[in-house]
Amino acid sequence: MSKPAAATIIVVDDDDLFRPLLVGNLREADYLVTEFDSPEALLRELDKGPLPADLYILDWKMPGMTGFELLKQLRGRGIVTSTLFLTSHDDVLYEESALREGAADFVGKTRSFAILRHRIERVLGAVAAPPSGDAPAPATIGALTLDSAQHRATWREKVVELTLGEYRAVQLLATSGRDVSYREIYDTMRGENFIAGAGPEGYRANVRALVKRIRQKFAEADAGFAAIENYPGYGYRWKVSDA
């Protein structure tokens, strides 16, 4: 059996001490890595032509152009490659901003490489297409259709443009058949027991922002959308609607 092709990762970080260490660890883990010491350096290279990449890893705070601003530039160029942010900031508002732009994950620089690698594998594994013939059939739950092979949600035959994290949350809510806690929803995006925001309950703000975005996107397809219901103090539930 041939060895699976290594994933290609583009790293953008201005820290000349941290970046070589990160890139070295990634290469030892068999990833193919291209590194840039500034957003401007990456954009100049992209001006020459497309760069193959399965994942972007961006530093959040860089002089001149932040990682968040760089992500918006990439999206403006039509680059929708999954993006993971590295940051020394733990403020929940930073995370919400990144997720609003479609970032797949948000990891503190103080986390160990083993944890970072796990999160990278989660992102890469989630966006990888299943082998031909093994793709699961789309699931229909009332007016909702979930295509796990493409991570696509359709509501009343209209495609709802969800990020990977948003799709995971919708899938969990719609298929669980029960009330789902804030913690469970957050863990679909982060890995179990990851703490965000201020205090042990800080992740709740992230989940509220996530659900608000999801509701807005479904409302664009159907102004009467009301399938996500609050369970006060606990989380959310999915109310099955007829197609």
Image (cartoon, helix red, strand yellow):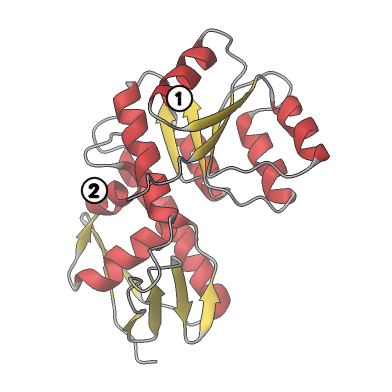
| Quadrant showing the C terminus | bottom left
Q: Which residue is mark 1?
A: 27
Q: Are marks 1 and 2 in contact (CB under 8 Å)?
A: no
Q: Look at 40% across and 73% down and name the residue there.
A: 147
Residue 74: image x %, image y %? 69, 44
Residues 214 and 190: in front is: 190
Using the rendered image of the protein, determine whether residue 198 is visible from the camera's viewpoint.
no
Q: Along the horizontal axis of the image, is 59 left or right of 119?
A: right
Where residue 228 sits in the image (x, y, percent)?
A: 35, 71
Disc 1 marks a residue whose amino acid type is Arg
Q: Residue 16 is drawn in which quadrant?
A: top right
Q: Is residue 190 above or below residue 80?
A: above
Q: How many marks?
A: 2
Nearer to us of marks 1 and 2 is 1
Rendering coords of residue 204 (x, y %):
31, 45
Q: Name the N-terminal-most of marks 1 and 2.
A: 1
Q: Which residue is mark 2?
A: 183
Distance from label 1 to label 2 (Cα)?
A: 33 Å
Q: Residue 182: in sight, yes or no?
A: yes
Q: Residue at x 76, y 33 (%)?
A: 45
Residue 242 in the image, given as x and y percentages of width and height: 35, 92
Q: Which structural element holds mark 1?
A: helix
Nearer to me, 222 or 112: 112
**Dot 2 amino acid type:** Arg
Circle 2 crowding by C-alpha within 10 Å: few under 14, some 14–19, many from 20: some
**For the point 43% across and 55% down, which residue is it?**
128
Residue located farthest toward the front when viewing the structure as drawn: 1
